Every structure is written in C-alpha cells, then in structure tokens.
Image (cartoon, rainbow, N blue to C red):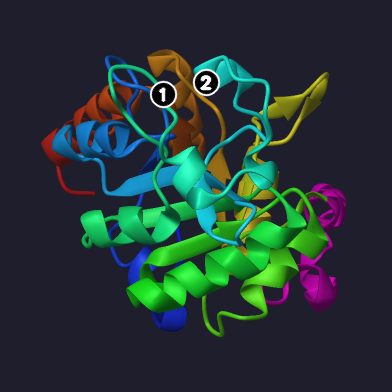
Amino acid sequence: MARRRRPADRGEWFSPPAPRVLAHRGLALDVPENTLASFDAALRRGAIYLETDVHASLDGIAMIAHDPSLLRVAGIDAEVADMTTDELQKVDLGDGHRMPTLVDALRAFPQARFNIDVKSQRAGVAIARAVIEAGATDRVLVTSFSAARRAAAVGLLPGVANSASAPRFVAILALAKLGILGLAPWAIGGVDAVQVPPRRGRLSIATPRVVRALHRRGVEMHVWTVNDPDEMRRLLELGVDGIVTDRCDLALDVARSMAADRSALPPA
C-alpha cells in the first residue's frame, strides 16, 4: 500500500487519520438526502465527513441541494436559483424535512468536516459568505467540476482546503500516468486532493501509479461514488485516502475491519 502523506499545515479538515469516509449527501436510508436529518444519520453511524452540494437561492443564500431543480426531490418543476430562501424552506422534501442553508448545517454540526461541491457560479460567493459566517473555514473542503466555480469560492476563503476541478485533474492524471507529475508543479500547486471516479469507461483512474504520484506530492485521492464493500476494500488496499459513498455505514465497517486486520498482524 502506498504511504499516505499529509503536510502539517493543511488544517483541521485533514487532521483525522485517513482513510476518510465521506457521507455522500449524508446517509439517506430513511430520510431525504442533503437534509439535516441525513447528515445527523451519517454522524450517528460514526462518519466525520459530510459530502454535500450547494446552489444559491434567488436572494443569494447558499442552499444545500444537488440538483438545480426541485423536480426530483420534491416533484416541483422549479429552479433553486429562481426561489427565495423563504420559499425554498417551505418546500417539503418528504416527511416534513426541509432544505437547509449551508450556514445552518455548518452550525448544526460543529464537529463535522464538510466537503462542498459548488454547483453554480453564484453559489461560489454564497458558499464563501456562509463558511465565514459560521467560522468554518478550517473544516471545509471546496470542490467543483468547474474551475471557475471552484475559484469563486476558494478565492474568498484564504487557506481553505480544496480539490482539483475536472480540467486540472485531466492534466494531473496524464502527468501521473507518464510518471512526470513531479516535473510539473503548476499542475498540482494549491491543490490538496483530487476527487474522481475509480474509472472512466475503459480508463482506470485509481491505479497504484497514480496514487503513488499524488502521495509523493502530498496530495490525497478520494474516489466517488462507491457503494460496494468489496470495491471499497479494493480501493483502500490500493492506497486511496478517501471513499465518497451513499453507504457510509458500510464503508465505516470496511475501514474498521481493515484496521483490525492490520492491528492483528505481528510487528514487521
């Protein structure tokens, strides 16, 4: 297994030891995703990390929601961006659960680390305001497929942890597979992690060579969205630092089992 490295100055988000189990939209087995109840369910199962998504409301508030529309989660054909915070929080997501604001979630779970996906350009500024208001910069990681959306939040949160946007990771992956990532510091500079699927089509992304190349540069690899325990174990044995999963309960069991197996081994 590749040795994990973590620069000492990365802050609170990285302070718990890897592997990291990131509860994807919380744990939504009996409650709606991306709600305070789903986050609470994940934390009660032992999760430390909550993965979530943010759009901006019409009045510029960071709202926790994955989709731009309410159609899938509430059966309402309306956009998050076209509704005020007050209107959004009157929407029933199921059994009386409501859409939380980001600042409310950060305040409700002050010990949790949040992995925040910036889902729109306007959300970047809204996220930064919410994180500052909650005093949570040191326990937030910001990510986005879009470099512009990611930059909109990261630029307003000095020192915040962040992962590479999709265009940046394409370059990182190519350089890592060629074995020359160390010759291109521009590709990895300012990035704490990469968050990727284990494969894309026939292309394997989470490979020992890529993991080793990232670890040599002090960068973590988190893999999404993995719900099969055998695949979780395979990836953790390969050396990935984090698993993003809808089933944090299963992933935590796998991580604990692997830790117990290691502790049972005789000293080297």
Residue 110 coordinates in the image, percent (x, y): 22, 62
> Sequence order check: which comes first, mark 2 or mark 1?
2
Q: Tell me: residue 225, above or below residue 11.
A: above
In the image, taking residue 80 as reference, residue 205 lies left or right, namely right
Which residue shows up at 63% across the image and 32% down it?
Answer: 67
Instruction: Residue 136: name its quadrant.
Output: bottom left
User: Could you tell whether 101 is left or right of 62 in the image?
Assistant: left
Query: Looking at the image, which residue is at 62% across and 19% down?
Result: 71
Asked if residue 255 is among those painted magenta in the image, a careful observer would answer no
Q: Is residue 43 visible?
A: yes
Say whether residue 241 is visible.
Answer: no
At a point 64% along the width and 30% down the height, the residue shown is: 198
Toward the viewer: 232 or 58? 58
Instruction: Assess disc 2: are there few (<14), some (14-19) or many (≥20) residues with their C-alpha within 10 Å of its C-alpha.
Output: some
- The residue at which mark 1 appears reads as 93
Q: How many marks?
A: 2
Instruction: For mark 2, give the secondary structure.
Output: helix
Quote the CA–CA distance across marks 2 and 1. 6 Å
| Secondary structure of the residue carrying numbered label 1 | loop
In the rendered view, tell whether residue 113 sits above or below residue 158.
Answer: above
Secondary structure, magenta segment, majority class:
helix
Q: Are marks 2 and 1 in contact (CB under 8 Å)?
A: yes
- The residue that appears at 25% across and 41% down in the rendered structure is 47
Residue 242 at x, y percent in the picture = 45, 44
Give coordinates of residue 100: x percent, y percent: 39, 45
Q: Is residue 1 left or right of residue 249?
A: right
Residue receiving disc 2: 73
Label 1 Cα neighbours within 10 Å, binned few <14 / some 14-19 / many ≥20: many
- Measured along the vertical axis of the image, is residue 151 above or below residue 234? below
Please provide the residue range marked out in magenta.
167-191
Residue 261 lies in what quarter of the image? top left
